[in-house]
């Protein structure tokens, strides 16, 4: 078990509640600004992210600065007992800047130069943009760096996208020269140059991927995505220079995202890399609750997965920096949160490791594309509004739970997730064009642990495996020999590993491993994978495992057993009665291989046995049916357990031991009713809960 030691991520030892506050949209309405202060008290909010898109309010003309409004906001928030997360304004620029310095504009992959407008629409290489952003950041740090209300830096906003301008072409080539030690032959080898005559004999011939040029060289596509991540981090680091210099004790963050349609981590950047450069992980979570394509519990599982991933990136609490108290404005259908959902979804965030519930945004804007986006204060300006009251309720509860801030979620199970793997797999022309679904598959492997209330870390390939009992590695198609040898060491020293079909096919350059399945994989699993079959979506096969048969879809590895034990076999097709599920004892540890994509009940049965064998337990045993999730935060003195009903029915849960209900201040034991979307937050002192 890992340490329960607190990891405080901000200087205030409390849960943050608040959100994006844009007074710069209301500067001609002093009455509104006065109302804000009154309403903030009623909403029980304490922290505000300010200035995210305020560049034109701070520097209306080049070199002309208007900080007075921000001075006033700093003072009034401070006098009201609030703290400020101050943004750097690079996410959107004033028109004068693009007009005078067009090099700051982004160029897309078709080599078309963008116009001024929108946001997140600039070149990350432009020396002018780097200079201008660093300069305004310096002025902000000089002016507010010592202000007692300043809690954290919010650097830019949701960094994303890529630029293909001439400056970026130069930067890409520099990056490649550094990565390949100036050795063009090494690059040609890594990119499999002779294929379609794509060997370069000069660095100057290389251009970034484009649908009107080169986009079939997988090694190049992968390197381009790596470059985009590094170049974005590099731009961010340039923004940090004055902040680190003038405010070395103020933590910095930039807000991460999720792709919302299917609620998977944002794919444009490798957050595993980016995480190393922020002090605190923050993310903007907008799950489409009550949608028409999945159950509430299915969506809750995906939220839990992203939370566990973003928390594990730094192995410390994260901050939910944006969420909506009701609807958003950019889903296909923007449905309001049903009663109780705001509290439930907020408590889920805290349960998985968030030390905050923050909103986009404090006050609904009056015009433009976000005028109908949910906010704490609606156009009615009323504290009697249903959404406002939901927010105030969450605020009060967060105040009563402030001792949770900094507490962690020790886990014995790790599931590995890898951005590069997803990029490479999606790029691969082969297998099923639409069925690879790497992230969704990782989430399916996560599901069983989520349903059985077993804490999980979702880790990167370079994180230390040694503190876990079990590491699950689904579909790790891109596997370097270096990661593989660390994995081998983990199993050799007593760890248990589970892996699946489509693992260990290519190396870090997206070049196929030669000579069959890598030798270390063969040693760990006691098998050789000799072929991968891809099925049409309407095809299926079956696997017998134990006494039962399970449906297989889409992928099946054909396996030759060397020393492993056969635990399951395929039942159909030309590989009927060949091994589908195997296990193997390797040195002090154990491995399991799942050859095909199997239905949910298989995961539940299969992982159920491993959970028993490794004695993996929930933090508190709470008996319940599906749809209820039990998650915990642990401190050195107590466990706080969140029992959440993500179903539309009333559920009965059973507490085998007495617990203290923190929201109602009563003892609970035995049978407890949980209404639709209800949540119980209970505590158990450590001495009563040492399993
Ligand atoms: C993003 C942005 C915010 C706002 C919200 C709306 O997360 O960071 O500025 O546009 O989306 O959901
Ligand atoms: Zn550029």
Image (cartoon, helix red, strand yellow):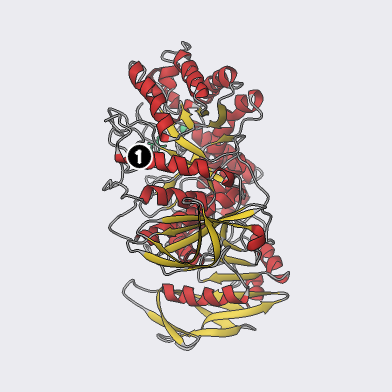
Q: Is residue 313 above or below residue 364?
A: below
Residue farthest to the front, as pictured = 666
In the drawing, does residue 200 fall left or right of residue 427? right
Ligand 1 has an atom within 8 Å of the beta carbon of the residue at disc 1: no
Between 29 and 288, the one lying in front of the other is 29
Q: In the rendering, at what x and y percent does residue 523 appear?
A: 67, 75
Residue 100 lies, with reference to residue 92, above or below; the image says: above
The answer to whether one can see residue 597 in this image is yes
x, y (%) of residue 531?
50, 76
Q: Which residue is mark 1?
A: 389
Q: Give residue 182's quadrant in the image.
A: top right
Q: Nearer the viewer, residue 260 or 33?
A: 33
Name the image quarter holding the C terminus.
bottom right
- Can see residue 321? no
Task: Give the x, y percent position of residue 323.
Answer: 41, 42
Where, quadrant-wise, is the N terminus in this rendering?
A: bottom right
Whole-percent x, y for residue 369 in the image: 29, 33
| Count of numbered badges drawn on the protein | 1
At 31% from the left and 54% from the top, the residue drawn is 290
Q: Is residue 549 above or below residue 237?
A: below
At 72% across and 74% down in the image, what residue appears? 588
Tell me if residue 676 comes above or below residue 567 in the rendering.
Answer: above
Q: Nearer the viewer, residue 41 or 557?
A: 41
Decide: few, some or many residues near mark 1? Use Cα within 10 Å; few <14, some 14-19, many ≥20.
some
- Residue at 59% x, 78% y: name it: 528
- Provide the secondary structure element on which disc 1 rests: helix
């Amino acid at each position: 078990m890992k340490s329960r030691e607190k990891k405080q991520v901000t200087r205030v030892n409390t849960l943050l509640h608040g959100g994006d506050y844009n007074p710069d949209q209301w500067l001609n309405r002093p009455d509104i600004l006065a109302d804000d202060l009154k309403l903030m008290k009623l909403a029980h909010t304490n922290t505000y992210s300010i200035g995210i898109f305020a560049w034109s309010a701070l520097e209306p003309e080049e070199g002309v600065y208007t900080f007075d409004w921000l001075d006033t906001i700093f003072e009034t928030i401070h006098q009201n007992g609030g703290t400020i997360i101050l943004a750097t304004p690079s996410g959107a620029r004033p028109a004068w800047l693009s007009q005078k310095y067009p090099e700051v504009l982004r160029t897309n992959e078709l080599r078309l130069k963008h116009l001024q407008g929108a946001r997140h629409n600039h070149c990350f290489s432009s020396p002018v943009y780097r200079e201008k952003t660093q300069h305004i950041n310096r002025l902000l740090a000089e002016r507010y760096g010592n202000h007692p209300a300043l809690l954290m830096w919010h650097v830019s906003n949701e960094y994303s996208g890529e630029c293909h301008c001439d400056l970026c072409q130069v930067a890409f080539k520099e990056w490649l020269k550094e990565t390949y030690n100036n050795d063009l032959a090494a690059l040609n080898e890594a990119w499999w140059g002779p294929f379609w005559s794509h060997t370069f004999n000069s660095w100057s011939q290389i251009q970034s991927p484009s649908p009107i040029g080169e986009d079939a060289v997988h090694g190049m596509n992968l390197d381009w995505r790596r470059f985009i991540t590094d170049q974005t981090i590099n731009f961010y680091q340039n923004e940090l220079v004055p902040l680190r210099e003038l405010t070395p004790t103020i933590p910095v963050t930039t807000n991460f995202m999720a792709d919302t349609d299917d609620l998977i981590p944002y794919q444009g950047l490798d957050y595993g890399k980016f995480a190393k450069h922020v002090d605190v992980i923050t993310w903007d979570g907008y799950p489409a609750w009550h949608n028409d394509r999945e159950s509430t519990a299915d969506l809750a599982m995906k939220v839990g997965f992203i939370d566990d991933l973003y928390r594990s990136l730094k192995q410390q609490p994260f901050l939910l920096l944006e969420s909506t108290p009701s609807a958003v404005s950019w889903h296909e259908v923007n449905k309001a949160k049903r009663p109780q959902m705001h509290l439930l979804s907020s408590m889920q965030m805290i349960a998985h490791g968030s030390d905050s519930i923050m909103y986009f945004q404090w006050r609904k804007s009056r015009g433009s594309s976000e005028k109908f986006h949910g906010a704490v204060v609606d156009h009615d300006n009323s504290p009697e509004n249903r959404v406002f009251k939901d927010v105030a309720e969450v605020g009060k509860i967060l105040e009563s739970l402030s001792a949770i801030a900094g507490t962690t979620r020790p886990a014995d199970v790790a599931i590995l997730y890898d951005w590069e793997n997803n990029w490479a797999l999606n790029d691969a022309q082969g297998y099923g064009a639409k069925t690879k679904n790497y992230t969704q598959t990782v989430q399916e492997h996560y599901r069983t642990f989520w349903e059985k209330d077993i804490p999980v870390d979702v880790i990167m390939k370079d994180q230390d495996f040694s503190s876990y009992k079990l590491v699950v590695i689904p579909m790790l198609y891109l596997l370097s020999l270096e990661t593989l040898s660390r994995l081998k060491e983990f199993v050799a020293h007593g760890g248990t590993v589970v892996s699946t079909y489509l693992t260990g096919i290519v190396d870090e350059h997206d070049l196929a491993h030669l000579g069959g399945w890598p030798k270390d994989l063969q040693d760990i699993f006691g098998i050789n994978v000799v072929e991968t079959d891809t099925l049409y979506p309407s095809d299926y096969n079956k696997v017998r495992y134990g006494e039962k048969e399970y449906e297989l879809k889409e992928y099946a590895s054909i396996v030759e057993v060397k020393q492993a034990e056969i635990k399951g076999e395929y039942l159909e097709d030309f590989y009927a009665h060949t091994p589908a599920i195997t296990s193997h004892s390797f040195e002090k540890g154990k491995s399991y291989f799942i050859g095909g994509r199997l239905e949910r009940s298989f995961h539940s049965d299969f992982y159920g046995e491993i959970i028993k064998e490794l004695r993996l337990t929930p933090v508190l045993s709470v008996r319940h049916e599906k749809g209820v999730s039990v998650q915990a935060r642990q401190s050195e003195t107590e466990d706080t357990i969140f029992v959440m009903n993500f179903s539309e029915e009333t559920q009965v849960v059973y507490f085998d031991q007495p617990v203290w209900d923190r929201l109602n201040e009563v003892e609970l034991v035995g049978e407890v009713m949980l209404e639709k979307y209800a949540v119980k937050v209970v505590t158990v002192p450590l001495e009563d809960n040492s399993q």
